[in-house]
Image (cartoon, helix red, strand yellow):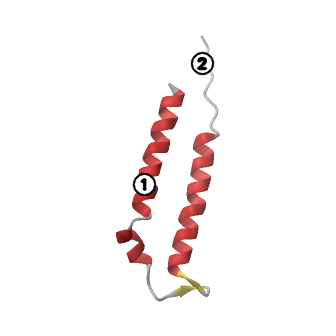
Amino acid sequence: MQNKLTKQKLTLFSVLLLLLFTYPVISIVNKVSFVAGIPVLFLYVFIVWIIAIIILFRVADRKPKKTDE
């Protein structure tokens, strides 16, 4: 059961990442502006990438709960 739930979470997260990296969303942050000297598009890609790594690690590394049976 836990394995199926993990697969579902990873699939849902993959679709979310696909949506976050499609052209309409990227075009929103593709501006000629800088934050601390870094282009906004680079910051967006880097931040989404780091958050994705953290979330994927937490989902994949989760231990199944022990049941008292």
Whether tag 2 and tag 1 are in contact, CB under 8 A, the answer is no
Percent x, y for residue 30?
44, 80
Q: On the image, numbered disc 2 is attached to which residue?
A: 67
> Which SS class for mark 2?
loop
Characterize the local packing of mark 1: few (<14), some (14-19) or many (20 or more) Cα atoms within 10 angstroms: few
Residue found 63% across the figure and 22% down from its top? 66
> Which SS class for mark 1?
helix
Characterize the local packing of mark 2: few (<14), some (14-19) or many (20 or more) Cα atoms within 10 angstroms: few
Give, as a three-letter code, the residue at label 1. Leu
Give, as a three-letter code, the residue at label 2. Thr
Inter-mark Cα distance, 2 to 1: 32 Å
Image quarter (top left, top right, bottom left or bottom right) of the C terminus = top right
When the figure is inspected, residue 46 is found, relative to residue 37, above or below; the finding is above
Percent x, y for residue 62?
62, 37
In the shown orientation, is residue 53 left or right of residue 12?
A: right
Q: On the image, numbered disc 1 is attached to which residue?
A: 16
Task: Give whichever of discs 2 and 1 has the lower sequence position.
Answer: 1
When the figure is inspected, residue 16 is found, relative to residue 65, above or below; the finding is below
Residue found 48% across the figure and 33% down from its top? 5
Report which quarter residue 8 is drawn in. Answer: top left
When the figure is inspected, residue 33 is found, relative to residue 41, above or below; the finding is below
Residue found 52% across the figure and 72% down from its top? 44
Q: Nearer the viewer, mark 2 or mark 1?
A: 1
When the figure is inspected, residue 31 is found, relative to residue 47, above or below; the finding is below
In the shown orientation, is residue 19 left or right of residue 52?
A: left
Report which quarter residue 31 is drawn in. Answer: bottom left
Residue found 60% across the figure and 61% down from its top? 50
View extreme (left): residue: 24
Percent x, y for residue 21?
44, 64
How many callouts does the rendering have? 2
Percent x, y for residue 51?
57, 59
